[in-house]
Amino acid sequence: MSTLLLTPVEARILGVLIEKKHTVPDTYPLSLNALLSGCNQKTSREPVMELSEPEVLEALDNLRHQSLTIESSGGRVSKYAHNMDRVLGVPSQSIAILTVLMLRGPLTPAEIRLYCERLHRFSDVSAVEAFLTELAERSAGALVVELPRQPGARERRWAHLLCGEPDLSSLTSAAPAASGGSQSAAQAALEARVSTLEAEVAELRALIESLTAP
């Protein structure tokens, strides 16, 4: 298992920072408001969270002490970026896989490939499976684990280990109704667009607040 142990809030923050670096690069690093909005998105998130600003700030402080995030000041607003690739020492393809698992929960290799589209474009499912195997057999500690097959499912799902061993009982009860299937490319694209728009709105709101602050 990974020697890195995060809380669910810390994992959500890292996932959002990595995601937004690719989907809204013009507004990255993220302001606190944009980061909070990304953490609390109702789309492309499992589970959906309702985090407060103090919760996010506390988690950011913990992540900074582990060198997983970097804080910078841009004008009147502090900005936050991730440093996960350097800390873990894994390739960008693996970071993309870990990101979608942190944001969406356990997924099949086919789902991972679909949701990674804007982070890294894998040529086929076998490429995803190869990186999953590398992450599971990593000498410094496994970062992912293949879960037992769910009843009625055609494919086994994978989960990240950044928050410790997954609770199999809760995963079973939360398994999607269409287990083993993948959302359509059109729906995934729509979710990605909504995610981008939410981040842009949050960033504009933060900019207005900074300009109108006394």
Image (spheres, rainbow, N blue to C red):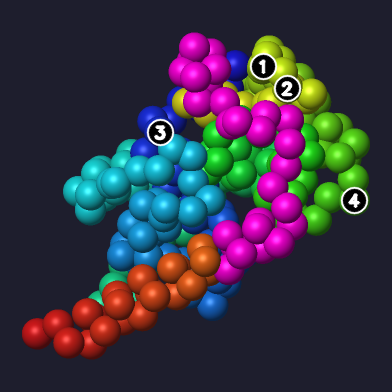
Between the residue at mark 2 and the residue at mark 4, the CA separation in whole angstroms equals 24 Å
Magenta stretch: give its range: 164-193
Eyeballing the image, is 90 above or below 119? above
Looking at the image, is mark 2 or mark 3 nearer the viewer?
Answer: 2
Contact between marks 4 and 1 (CB within 8 A): the answer is: no
Look at 17% across and 87% down and name the residue there: 212
Residue at numbered disc 4: 123
Looking at the image, is mark 4 or mark 1 nearer the viewer?
Answer: 1
Between the residue at mark 2 and the residue at mark 3, the CA separation in whole angstroms equals 26 Å
Contact between marks 2 and 1 (CB within 8 A): the answer is: yes
Quarter that holds the N terminus: top right
Quarter that holds the C terminus: bottom left
Eyeballing the image, is 189 above or below 158? below
Q: Which sits in the foreground, 211 or 91? A: 211
Contact between marks 1 and 3 (CB within 8 A): the answer is: no
Q: Which sits in the foreground, 133 or 174? A: 174
In what element is the residue under mark 2?
Answer: loop
Residue at numbered disc 1: 150
x%, y% of residue 211? Answer: 23, 87
Drawn side of residue 86 relative to residue 204, left or right: right
Instruction: Give the crowd class for mark 3: few <14, some 14-19, many >=20 residues within 10 Å.
Output: some
Drawn side of residue 19 relative to residue 204, left or right: right
